[in-house]
Image: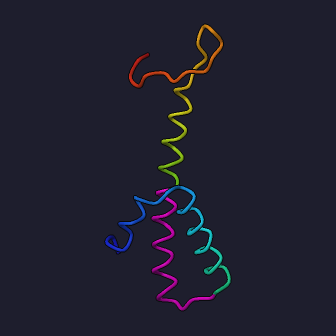
């Protein structure tokens, strides 16, 4: 299954979220057989992890934005306290 999920790391947040939402709808509607449900559930879990990782990275970038003495927003260099 890892090989099938290798493409997830290259997906944008929006694409991964859209696919995850599609998987959830299929599972909730009972549109797929048991074996396929298990496979898409596993992919959904990988998509969820990817989305969480992407959101965390974005959150860290936002936290680095500070207001300078001139009142303008600027990005703080990583690793500088």
Front-lying residue, 61 or 70:
70
Quick one: 33 or 66, which is closer to the camera? 66
Q: Which residue lies furthest to the left in this view?
A: 3
Q: Position of residue 18 (x, y in %)?
A: 60, 66
What residue is shown at x 51% (from left), y 69% (from top)?
44
Coordinates of residue 8 in the picture (x, y in percent) = 42, 63
Rendered location of residue 60, percent (x, y): 50, 35
Residue 65 location in percent, x, y? 56, 25
- Quadrant the C terminus occupies: top left
- Where 22 sits versus 11, above or below? below
Side of 4 relative to 58 (left or right): left
Magenta segment includes 38: yes
Residue 40: in magenta span: yes
Rendered-image quadrant of the N terminus: bottom left
The residue positioned 51% from the left and 75% from the top of the image is 41
What is the span of residues highlighted in magenta in the rendered image?
31-50
> Furthest-top residue in view?
69
């Amino acid at each position: 299954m890892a090989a099938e999920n290798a493409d997830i790391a290259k997906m944008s947040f929006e694409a991964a979220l859209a696919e995850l939402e599609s998987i959830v709808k299929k599972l909730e509607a009972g549109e797929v057989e048991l074996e396929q449900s298990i496979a898409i559930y596993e992919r959904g879990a990988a998509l969820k992890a990817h989305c969480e990782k992407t959101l965390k990275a974005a959150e860290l970038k936002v936290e680095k934005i500070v207001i300078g003495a001139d009142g303008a927003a600027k990005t703080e260099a990583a690793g500088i306290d």
